[in-house]
Image (cartoon, rainbow, N blue to C red):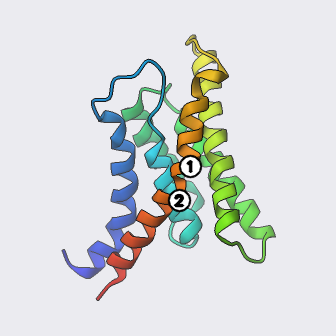
Amino acid sequence: MNRKLRARLTPTLSVLIGSAMTLAPIIADAPMLPPFGLMMLLAWRLMRPEYWKIWAAAPFGLFDDLLSGQPPGSAVLLWSLIFLAIEAVDNRLVWRDYWQDWAIAAAAIAFALTGGLVLVLLSGGGGGLSLIVPQLLISILLYPLAARIAARLDRWRLAI
């Protein structure tokens, strides 16, 4: 793969592959699988804020909606709101460190999972907040792994 193509496609493909993880044949009574697509999107956005425009969350959310089984448009809405919130935080902070990025990602993941639950409930689904607590905790604890994967991919994509 030539260098320009690799530099351009690596972040996008990593988010799409993360969203495709919902297709893994895992059987569970409750949601346990973290939103890998969102986690990769957050990792890239927090690491390279200049890479994607704010509107980029919408097509990634649409792809995730198509694969995840969530009500159509839920990830489009929630991921776009997350990108807007991160943009607002970025405009206020002079600098961020690792812990602040993790806190921002944790808040974004919590917002996306609880917002997704609310949208499912509004569309006639069932369940309660206690249903997503394990998924939420696993997702927040695994975010540093997603950030590390994005950092390694970034180093690979920019290598000569």
Dot label at residue 86 = none
* Neighbour tally class for label 1: few under 14, some 14-19, many 20 plus, Cα within 10 Å: some
Q: Residue at x 39, y 72 (%)?
A: 152
Q: Residues within 10 Å of mark 2 (few under 14, many from 20)?
A: some
Q: Quadrant of residue 54?
A: bottom right
Q: Quick one: quadrant of the N terminus? A: bottom left
Q: Nearer the viewer, residue 92 or 109?
A: 109
Instruction: Using the rendered image of the protein, determine whether residue 49 is visible from the camera's viewpoint.
Output: yes
Q: Residue 98: x and y, percent? A: 64, 69
Local SS, label 2: helix
Mark 1 residue element: helix
Residue positioned 33% across, 50% down in the render: 17
Q: Which mark is residue 141?
A: 1
Which image quadrant for residue 78? top right
Which residue is at 55% across, 57% downward?
A: 42
Q: Amino acid at mark 1?
A: Leu
- In three-dimensional space, the C-alpha distance between marks 2 and 1, rounded to whole angstroms, equals 7 Å
Q: Position of residue 11 (x, y in %)?
A: 40, 64
Kindly identify which residue carries mark 2. Answer: 144
> Residue 61 versus residue 114: which sits nearer the camera?
114
Q: Is residue 77 visible?
A: no
Q: Measuring 50% from the left and 48% from the top, which residue is drawn there?
A: 38
Mark 2–mark 1 CB contact (< 8 Å): yes
- Residue 137 relative to residue 157: left or right: right
Q: Position of residue 77 (x, y in %)?
A: 60, 39
| Amino acid at the residue labelled 2 | Pro
Which residue reaches farthest bottom?
A: 160
Locate residue 152 relative to residue 120 in the image: left or right: left
